[in-house]
Image (cartoon, grey):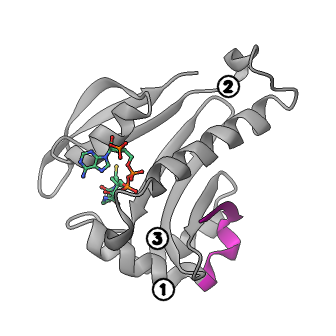
């Protein structure tokens, strides 16, 4: 598997695969084609993709980078490739970006230079909550009816370094 960061302006060749995964992964809040295409208009949005040995896109993570934090905006893995560490690999790539972007002289002794990563996850999305907890994210607060419709609460989670 190859995991790499691409610019949102280079999304087009992957868009149809991403849309197929997105529609199956999210029942009530799937992003539209327009939403993905509009990512290219924002300098702060980036995408990490996972490609398998058959050159097929099997997962993606979209994040916003600001001076003070990263915010995971979207993360999904194709159903038949779940449970194989793809999402963990995408998150690890993001941690690597965090290191490279904020501290070029990174060594194991200066992790404090890294910035936190935030995300929201639906309270009923147990696989995702388990994923983030196993990756060291902690629950900060609950946002009432964040996904509306259907009125499902979200947990705000944060990973510090
Ligand atoms: C959540 C999701 C991204 C996980 O992707 P994945 O590639 O299957 O996850 P990984 O194989 O990397 O799993 C890493 C860890 O997450 C946890 N985890 C993942 N899927 C899980 C499940 N179904 N049940 C319980 N724990 C799970 C486990 O701790 C796992 O570690 P382990 O395999 O050592 O037990 C995937 O299920 C998905 O695309 N879901 C639909 C979209 C979605 O909900 N995205 C998140 C939005 S916030």
Q: CA distance from mark 1 to mark 3?
A: 13 Å
Would you call the spot at circle 1 few (<14 residues within 10 Å), some (14-19), or many (20 or more)?
few
Q: Residue at the location (80% across, 28% down)?
A: 103
| Dot 1: element | helix
Would you call the spot at circle 2 few (<14 residues within 10 Å), some (14-19), or many (20 or more)?
many
Residue furthest right in the image: 105
Viewport quadrant of the C terminus? top right
| Dot 3: element | helix
Mark closer to the observer (1, 3): 1
Pointers 2 and 3 in contact (CB under 8 A)? no
| Dot 2: element | loop
Viewer-proximal residue among 146 and 16: 16
Question: Residue under circle 1?
Answer: 16
Q: Residue at the location (14% across, 47% down)?
A: 152
Q: CA distance from mark 2 to mark 3?
A: 29 Å
Residue 2 falls left or right of residue 132: right
Image spot of residue 80 (x, y percent): 33, 72
Question: Residue under circle 3?
Answer: 35
Question: Residue under circle 2?
Answer: 114
Cβ of mark 1 under 8 Å from ligand 1: the answer is no
Viewer-proximal residue among 40 and 49: 49
Residue 6 within the magenta-colored segment of the rendering: yes
Would you call the spot at circle 3 few (<14 residues within 10 Å), some (14-19), or many (20 or more)?
few
Image spot of residue 137 (x, y percent): 41, 29
Q: CA distance from mark 2 to mark 1?
A: 34 Å
Mark closer to the observer (2, 3): 2
Q: Which segment did they paint magenta?
A: 1-13
Q: Residue at the location (53% across, 45% down)?
A: 91
Determine which quarter of the picture holds residue 105: top right
Determine which quarter of the picture holds residue 132: top left
Q: Earlier in the sequence, mark 2 or mark 1?
A: 1
């Amino acid at each position: 598997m190859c995991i790499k960061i691409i610019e949102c302006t280079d999304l087009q060749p992957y868009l149809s695969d991403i849309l197929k995964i997105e529609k199956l992964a999210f029942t009530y809040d799937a992003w539209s084609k327009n939403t993905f295409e509009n990512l290219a208009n924002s300098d702060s949005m980036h995408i990490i993709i996972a490609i398998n040995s058959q050159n097929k896109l099997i997962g993606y993570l979209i994040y916003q980078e600001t001076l003070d934090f990263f915010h995971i905006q979207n993360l999904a893995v194709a159903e038949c490739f779940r449970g194989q560490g793809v999402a963990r690999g995408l998150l690890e790539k993001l941690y690597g970006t965090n290191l490279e972007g904020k501290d070029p002289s990174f060594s194991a002794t200066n992790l404090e230079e890294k910035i936190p990563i935030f995300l929201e996850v639906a309270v009923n999305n147990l696989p995702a909550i388990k994923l983030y907890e196993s990756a060291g994210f902690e629950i900060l607060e609950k946002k009432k009816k964040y996904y509306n419709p259907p009125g499902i609460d979200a947990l705000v989670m944060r990973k510090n370094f």
